[in-house]
Amino acid sequence: MTHSITPIGHILTPFTQKFSIPRQGLSLSCASGEIVFSEHIDIAQSLDGIEAFSHLWLLFLFHENLAQGYKTKVRPPRLGGNKKIGVFASRSSFRPNGIGMSVVKNLGMKGQRLQVQGVDLLSNTPIVDIKPYLPYADSVAQASAGFAQEKPKPPLTLKFSTQAAQKLVLHQACYPALTTLIHNTLSQDPRPSYKKHKQDNKIYFMQLYDIELSFCVMASTAEVIDIYPILT
Ligand code: SAM
């Protein structure tokens, strides 16, 4: 059987590139997003009652990876990137049908858009469905979590160079959540897994909204070197 899917809309998030997006939703991300519904969705009818649910499941397409297909075995970052595991035993973003799922906090409707918090999605990701999160059904107290059982690594300490700190104040005026978002993403060390165990002197670049940041990591500290607008 084949079945085609028409997204119900797309989500706008601060993440304008894949690098540096937290690897899970609510538990690791503080970022907010808003869902813009497609014209064929009757918003008033279809979202009636959604305000009663504090948390929602978002089902979406890993649209940036669809063209690349998938592999039956993947290297989860949590295993340091050097051990392979079956795709169905992972939350890899390269999957047979490219479907992702994230639990987010429901912040309610603002106009015709649904506001959510705790997103791990690239901006413009197509949303294919929304369902209420049901604690009695979706939360399993004694669940085992395989390789993801281990607690995430301790967060990196964050510091800003003098020029980055000055520019942050300016950008913060446009994006009030910017400082929190930078802390949230950099403290989780967004570098590729194989780099994390090494002292590396590389300068990395990451994008949030229409801003680019350069940073480096020394031991357990990430330093934001500079912040500048992305020129389009
Ligand atoms: N919580 C979801 C799940 O379990 O299905 C996503 C987990 S996946 C490991 C999260 C990663 O997917 C992010 O760190 C980001 O790099 C990537 N990602 C997010 N949105 C994407 C998109 N639209 N296309 C491709 N990759 C995406």
Image (cartoon, grey):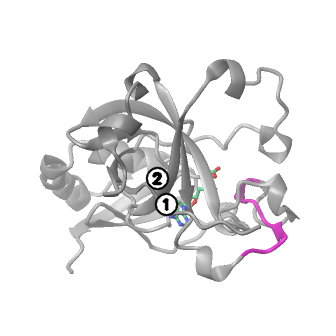
At label 2, counting other C-alpha atoms closer than 10 Å, the crowd grade (few under 14, some 14-19, many 20 or more) is: many
Residue 178 is situated, as x and y percent measured from the top left of the image, at 28, 48
Amino acid at pointer 2? Leu
The label shown at residue 20 is: 1
Judge depth for marks 2 and 1 and give the one in front.
1
| Label 1 residue SS | loop
State the residue in front, 155 or 103: 103
Secondary structure under the numbered disc 2 in the rendered image:
helix
Horizontal arrangement in the rendering, residue 39 relative to residue 163 (left or right): right
Of the numbered discs in the image, which one, if any, rests on residue 58? none
Is 47 on the left or on the right of 53, as rendered? left
Q: Going 79% across and 67% down the picture, which residue do you hit?
A: 74
Choose top left, top right, bottom left or bottom right for residue 132: top right
Residue bearing the label numbered 2? 186
Q: Is residue 71 magenta?
A: yes
Residue 214's place in the image compared with 170, above or below, is: below
* Residue name at image x 68 percent, y 63 percent: 193
The quarter of the picture where residue 143 lies is top right
Is the N terminus in the top left, top right, bottom left or bottom right quadrant?
bottom right
Q: What amino acid is at disc 1?
A: Ser
Of the pair 157 and 39, the residue shown nearer to us: 39
Locate the C terminus by quadrant.
bottom left
Asked if marks 2 and 1 touch (Cβ < 8 Å), the reply is yes
Asked if disc 2 is less than 8 Å from ligand 1, the answer is no
Residue 144 lies left or right of residue 68; in this view the side is right
- CA separation, marks 2 and 1? 7 Å
N-terminal-most mark, 2 or 1: 1
**Which region of the structure is painted magenta?**
70-78
Residue 47 appearing in the image = yes
Q: Is residue 176 left or right of residue 11?
A: left
Number of numbered discs overlaid on the protein picture? 2
Ligand 1, by image quadrant, is bottom right
